[in-house]
């Protein structure tokens, strides 16, 4: 089902439209939220709540616009708020039992060659550096480099001038560069 | 640090943290079904209020149009003196002067017709009719000092 058709069905109250949108955007949305909150369970809660809010507010949505940026902006905003509150925010290093944590996954090199170990270490460095950024800067990095939004799209979705977006990205990149250890800058493989 | 590398690393981090087969739909569907019933009740209440308000407005408008005496009584209850004069065959001029005292005439309570205002033949008012309003300045009261 095409996105526009799904939105039109949802606007008519057809829950099938919502199902199509959930299936289309859930993975990307949870991944965006987990990069900001660094907590998968919290990220899933945020995305589920965002879908329910989209269901309630779909009448206000302009069907001429793409659903993805509108929805993902909402998820990113909620993730930033949750990260600020620190609710259910658990240190990945301290999380044990149940599902495997991001740190556990990264620490596990798998059966590959030594480069894979290095790549995993690099990702771990990156994760730690990202985690030390303020939530708003984390969100800017995620929107620009994970969701691949342009600065113009970010400005439109965040309802701020493009200059503000550029400044936030500049500050985030500068901080990230400072946090990232020099050794890990050399090789990322993959 | 190149931007392409940042994108690559974020992608890898995200993929390792959240598998492709994650499925939120059962939880979302349950949430929607929970919210549907109260939503329907709220919508029914809104429709009921709108219908009641519409009916009340209709009854009020009908009574004002159908009973010219009510128009005069209302004008008096509001503390206004009204003089209705027929100017032409189709137009009615209503001259309204604001009275200093906004007392409710006894007739408003007793149901007796007002005695101090000339009572021309009641003519229903409508928007098509020409209504002219003329204000008379309020009488000044002397400052006691």
Image (spheres, rainbow, N blue to C red):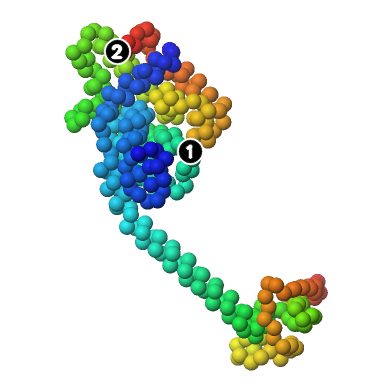
Examine the image and state in which quarter residue B141 appears.
Answer: bottom right
Quadrant holding the C terminus of chain A: top left
- Identified at 57% across, 26% down, the residue is A163
Give the letter of the chain under mark 1.
Answer: A
The residue pinned by badge 1 equals A65
The residue pinned by badge 2 equals A119
**A103 left or right, relative to B70:** left
Q: Is residue B19 visible?
A: yes
Front-lying residue, A116 or B21: B21
Q: Where A38 sits versus B133, above or below?
A: above
Q: Do discs 1 and 2 belong to a common subunit?
A: yes
Q: Is residue A46 visible?
A: no
x, y percentage for residue A156? Answer: 52, 33
Query: In the drawing, what numbered circle is on residue A3?
Result: none
Q: Nearer the viewer, mark 1 or mark 2?
A: 1
Label 2 Cα neighbours within 10 Å, binned few <14 / some 14-19 / many ≥20: many
- Identified at 41% across, 35% down, the residue is A68
**B39 left or right, relative to A106:** right
- Identified at 75% across, 73% down, the residue is B130
C-alpha gap between disc 1 and disc 2: 38 Å
**A46 left or right, relative to B21:** right
Front-lying residue, A132 or B107: B107
- Identified at 50% across, 73% down, the residue is B55
x, y percentage for residue B26? Answer: 25, 43
x, y percentage for residue B42? Answer: 39, 60
Q: Secondary structure at mark 1?
A: loop
Q: Secondary structure at mark 2?
A: helix
């Amino acid at each position: 089902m095409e996105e526009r058709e799904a939105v039109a069905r949802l606007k008519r109250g057809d829950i099938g439209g919502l199902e199509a949108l959930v299936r289309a955007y859930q993975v990307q949305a949870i991944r965006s939220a987990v990069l900001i909150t660094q907590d998968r369970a919290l990220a899933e809660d945020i995305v589920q709540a965002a879908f329910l809010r989209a269901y309630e507010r779909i009448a206000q949505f302009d069907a001429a616009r793409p659903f993805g940026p509108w929805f993902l902006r909402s998820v990113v905003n909620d993730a930033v708020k949750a990260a600020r509150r620190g609710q259910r925010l658990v240190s990945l290093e301290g999380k044990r039992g149940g599902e495997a944590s991001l740190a556990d996954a990264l620490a596990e090199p798998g059966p590959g060659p030594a480069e894979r170990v290095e790549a995993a270490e690099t990702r771990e460095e990156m994760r730690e550096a990202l985690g030390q950024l303020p939530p708003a800067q984390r969100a800017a990095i995620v929107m620009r480099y994970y969701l691949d939004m342009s600065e113009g799209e970010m400005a439109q979705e965040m309802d701020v001038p493009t200059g503000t977006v550029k400044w936030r990205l500049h500050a985030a990149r500068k901080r990230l560069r400072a946090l990232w250890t020099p050794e890990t800058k050399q090789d990322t493989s993959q | 640090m190149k931007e392409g590398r940042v994108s690559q690393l974020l992608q890898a981090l995200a993929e390792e943290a959240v598998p492709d087969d994650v499925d939120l739909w059962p939880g979302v569907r349950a949430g929607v079904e929970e919210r549907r019933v109260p939503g329907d009740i709220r919508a029914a209440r809104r429709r009921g209020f709108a219908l009641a308000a519409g009916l009340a407005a209709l009854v009020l408008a009908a009574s004002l149009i159908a009973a010219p005496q009510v128009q005069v009584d209302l004008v008096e209850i509001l503390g206004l003196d009204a003089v209705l004069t027929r100017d032409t065959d189709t137009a009615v001029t209503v001259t309204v002067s604001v009275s200093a005292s906004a007392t409710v005439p006894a007739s408003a309570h007793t149901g007796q017709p007002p005695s101090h205002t000339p009572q021309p033949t009641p003519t229903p008012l409508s928007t098509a009719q020409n209504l002219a309003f003329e204000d008379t300045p309020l009488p000044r009261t002397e400052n006691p000092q």
